[in-house]
Image: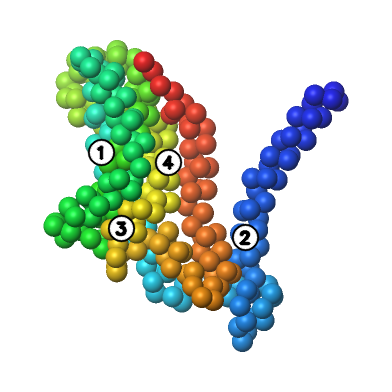
Amino acid sequence: MTLKRILGTFGFLALTVFILLPLVQVIVLSFLSTLHHDTAPKGSLTLLNYANIFRTDRLVASFLNSTIYVSLNVALTLIVALPAAYAFARFPFRSARATFFALLAFRVTPPVVLSLPAFLLFAQIELLNTPVGVALAHCVFNVPIAIWILESFIRGVPKELDETAFLDGYSTPGFIIKHLIPVIAPGIGAAAFFCFMFSWVEVVFARTLTITDGKPITTAISSLFGFQTDIGLVMAMTTLSLVPGLVMIWFVRNHLSRGFTVRV
């Protein structure tokens, strides 16, 4: 084995340890009793932290709230982004390129800039403290990235597929549903993944738009910190919150790099 390969292997192992060590610490702490309990002395291995999560109504509700608004957000984002991406890919128009990159520029706007306007607007239409309000707020940031990803995949589909379908009598919506979606399914999966990850871990809108009810996992975890914090319980919540993201990564792992190809 050459010196270059040895150094490369060592560097890879060092990077792996650097990345995984915090995660390992989180998982280990989630199985430790960090406060004294009658059934679990401090420092002992226990499943009590996980049991306490399912015994606490607000923590269970936070998982349900996050699942509702993330699922709703992903669905709404794809419904809006897919036709828009098809228009960008198939119907060139003046300033299309500038419009396309303007969407991407809007995506990098800090959420805190829009938190107050969103709060005032949703207060008027009575969407505060609901998962629906958080889902709609996240659509503002997820739609541009979904359009970017889907447009790249649609451009890779030959136009002959469109023309053949239209000759067979399909309308544009019918073609998209019957033919285009199955072909670009990996792109839809990649777009759904990035929308899911943004919504699952986003904090600003989740905290601003859920004052009393409808709180997601991110705010539920932060609410556990206090004068005497049960670190084991916090780590157990954190560990459980990682599971959906890891599942999503597993299913779309082969399509993520393709989704971030910009065609200009």
* Disc nearer the start of the sequence (3/1): 1
Q: Residue 142 in the image: x percent, y percent?
A: 33, 40
Q: Quadrant of residue 103?
A: top left
| In front of the other: 141 or 47 | 141
Front: mark 4 or 2: 2
- Give the labeled residue for mark 3: 208
Disc 4 marks a residue whose amino acid type is Phe
Residue drawn at point x = 56 percent, y = 64 percent: 235
| Kind of element beneath mark 1 | helix
Amino acid type, mark 2 = Ile
**Closer-to-camera residue (224/172):** 224
| Mark toward the start of the polypeptide (4 vs 2) | 2
* Pointer 4 or 3: first along the chain: 4
| N-term mark: 1 or 4 | 1
Q: Which residue is mark 4?
A: 193
Q: Are marks 1 and 4 in contact (CB under 8 Å)?
A: no
Q: CA distance from mark 1 to mark 4?
A: 15 Å
Distance of label 2 from label 1 (alpha carbons):
37 Å
Q: Which mark is residue 79?
A: 1
Q: Residue at x 40, y 21 (%)?
A: 262
**Residue 67 placed where, x, y %?**
37, 56
Q: Which residue corresponds to the image point at 24% horizontal and 30% vertical from the top-left? A: 83
Query: Disc 3 on helix, strand or loop?
Result: helix
Amino acid, disc 1: Ile
Is mark 4 in CB contact (under 8 Å) with mark 2? no
Residue 135 versus residue 144 in the image, above or below: below
Q: Is residue 190 left or right of residue 24?
A: left
Quarter of the image for residue 147 reads top left
Asked whether residue 44 appears in the rendered view, the answer is yes
Could you tell me how far apart the alpha carbons at marks 4 and 2 are, in whole angstroms? 23 Å
Three-letter code for the amino acid on which mark 3 is drawn: Thr
Query: Which residue is disc 2 drawn over?
Result: 27
